[in-house]
Amino acid sequence: MTAWREMTVEGWGRYPRSVARCARPERLAEVGQALADRDGSPVLAHGLGRSYGDAALLAGGRVVLTERLDRMLGFDASTGWLTAEAGVSLLDVIRTFAPRGFFPPVVPGTQLVTLGGALAADIHGKNHHVAGSFSDHVRRVHLLVADGRTVVCDREHEPELFHATVGGMGLTGVVLSMDLQLVAIESPWIELETVRVSNLDHFFEVSAGSEAWPYTVSWIDCAATGKAMGRGVFMRGRHAGPGAAPSGRLIERLKAVVEPLLDARPIEPDWLLNRATIRAFNETYFRMHGRGVQRSFVHYEPFFFPLDAVKNWNRLYGARGMMQYQPVVPPDPDHRAMRTILERISTSGFASFLAVIKEFGESHHSGLSFPRPGTTLALDFPNHGQPLLDLMDTLDDVVLDAGGRLYLGKDARVTRERFQRMYPEWRAWRAVRDHWDPDGVFASDLGRRLGLVQDGAAPTGPTRSAA
Amino acid sequence: MSAVVILGATSRIGQALAREFASAGFPVVLCARDLAEAGRIAADVTTRHGVTAEAVAFDACDFSSHGPTLSDVARRFGGIHVGVIAYGDMGDQGESELDFAAARRVIDINFTGAASAAEALYPLMAAARGGTIVGVASVAGERGRRSNYVYGSAKGAFAMYLDGLRGRGHKDGVRVLTVKLGFVDTRMTFPMATKIPKASPEAAARAIREAVESGVESMFYPPFWAPVMAIIRALPPALMKRLPL
């Protein structure tokens, strides 16, 4: 018998929240047992809860917490192939294998994601232009499907199920384990160049000139307007060779001050991140970087995962939570959509604390995987409620007109109609899902909102609990 | 190198202990009823730490199998350095009150089966004049409480058994460590909505390994349970029976 506990489940943005009955299997057989004990309710796997919106939520349903299914089942040091359960985190992979000279092929901005979540959202990283997305490095997946069987799928065996599971937001079944290709590294250090860019055109110029670097991303000051619009700090890096020298670690000192406060959770300050403090931060961050190209060596942690240095940093936004907005728009020599988006944000009065911009490379996915060639912008806003939702609706139209789309792993609010225009693949994806899950066993609040699951499966939308 | 044997390896604490001792370079033997699951844990510690790990079928209630199983392990691994008796089952107090078969099962797993395993480990370690038997007991065994006295009495009896075994081991070079666990965030406590802080299984495992290394003989984890249970032990029976504990 599965032990269920009623819990309020939230994503990393802490908006929305919903109540579900949760189980936390510790043995492989307990996952199938939880599915059998669902008592007619829909089911959803939930890893470390780092998707921002309602992707890992299922109001009134059964949520299977996968964090304890974290066994590494095998590793071949001659090829770099790791077989691991879906609850293993990237942090765990890196802590185990970086000292042995291996690193995950693709990492997002946090190490605190599970492999199952990484596959379900088909995450991308700073190396998308050369390495593609996470699933491009996954060979085989063990998936618990709706009828209780475990299906082994890859690009030859049940390829439709494999491709629907990649980026499928957990709606094809519960990922149990996978084979992941790790890449060889010679050092935990990153050889880093930062280039201060003065506007959007300058960003594209530097980005085009940085294609030989495996890792590229640019921080962007969304508060800047006019000629300075799009100014920022472009970062490009590569794994350093053996014997690289370290620089100082400011981040450690910052962590020591801030983390205890957030851990104890006495402060959930709605006022801390407001327009003035965000502007001041952006200005300081921009000025901190000297003009031209700066070279240094940094540890992989502050390079890839600067925010992991402060545990529970999402609480800086207070109980109201935050919302992310991440579109990709196809290449355009005039960058009209990007300009329009940046203009609308800078004139809206809503400041984005952390904004990054990056150019994606090729993509060959058929399902709901997000990355497409073009430019992606990732923004986060304190949850200002309706006025912010209205702004995002107008940005959706700009993205749609440009032929772009939003990242589901960060979304909490796009409408079903707009989503379906952004992802015309949804219909084919849905047919595969319906074949494997005809009775709507798997669902999520995001799936209900976007029409990715059978409507009959569950009529209610996400319920907002008292903050 | 002689092995660390985890009895009840598929519990989260057993698994965390396996990782702890494997990280220190010890070969680990994972004893459990669910051999397939123990095999996954063996694969995990080998993948993470490069040590030898082996899954062995073991049933706490199959007392007569304990001696042969553990001597076979000792023979193949060149001795047992540490043996951790980590299994336990809280059962259901209400069911135990209605059906003594259920109560007996709780006593068999938590006391009889635990003592049987310790008796099987002891001569192997005494013959080698070295080794540590770790018994995972519970704060529930510190005082009989109406909410779970069957489980509590079995754990309490096991702790008392370990006290005696420690004295016997003193002359034979066998050390005995009694671990009294408070709330740890495991499958046993997951459904409990409680304000009492739960320790992580990983932190508990680390504390146990450190205690083994430093030669500690008895510990509470988390440590705050020591004074809490001292107070509860001191309550007069006339008061205790009225408390909703």
Image (cartoon, rainbow, N blue to C red):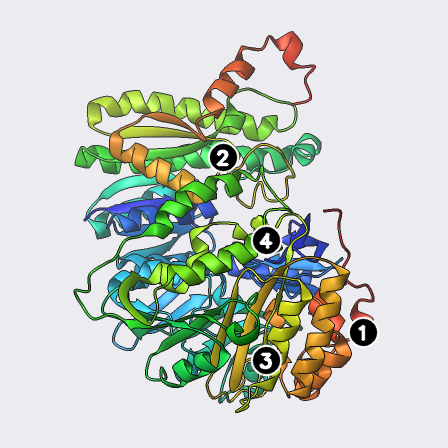
Q: Is residue B41 above or below residue A404?
A: above
Mark 1 touching mark 2, by CB under 8 A?
A: no
Question: What percent of the width, then of the height, locates residue B70?
Answer: 31, 45
Question: In this image, A413 relative to A85: left or right?
Answer: right
Q: Position of residue A439 (x, y in %)?
A: 75, 75
Q: Which label was assigned to residue A339?
A: 3
Asked whether, in this view, residue A7 is left or right of residue B8, the answer is right
| Callout in the foreground (4, 2) | 4
Chain to which the residue tagged by mark 3 belongs? A
Q: Residue at x 61, y 43 (%)?
A: A268
Q: Mark 4 = which residue?
A: A276
The amino acid pointed to by label 3 is Arg
Measured along the vertical axis of the image, is residue B174 above or below residue A76?
above
Please tell me whether mark 4 sits on a helix, a strand or a loop: helix
- Residue topped by disc 2: B110
Instruction: Categorize mark 4 by other alpha carbons within 10 Å: few (<14), some (14-19), many (20+).
Output: few
For mark 3, give the secondary structure.
Answer: helix
Which of the chains bears the disc numbered 2? B
Q: CA distance from mark 1 to mark 3?
A: 38 Å
- Could you say where residue A328 lies in the image, as x and y percent from the top left? 57, 80
Q: Is A348 left, or right, of B142 in this rendering?
A: right
Respond whether the residues carrying marks 1 and 2 are from the same subunit: no
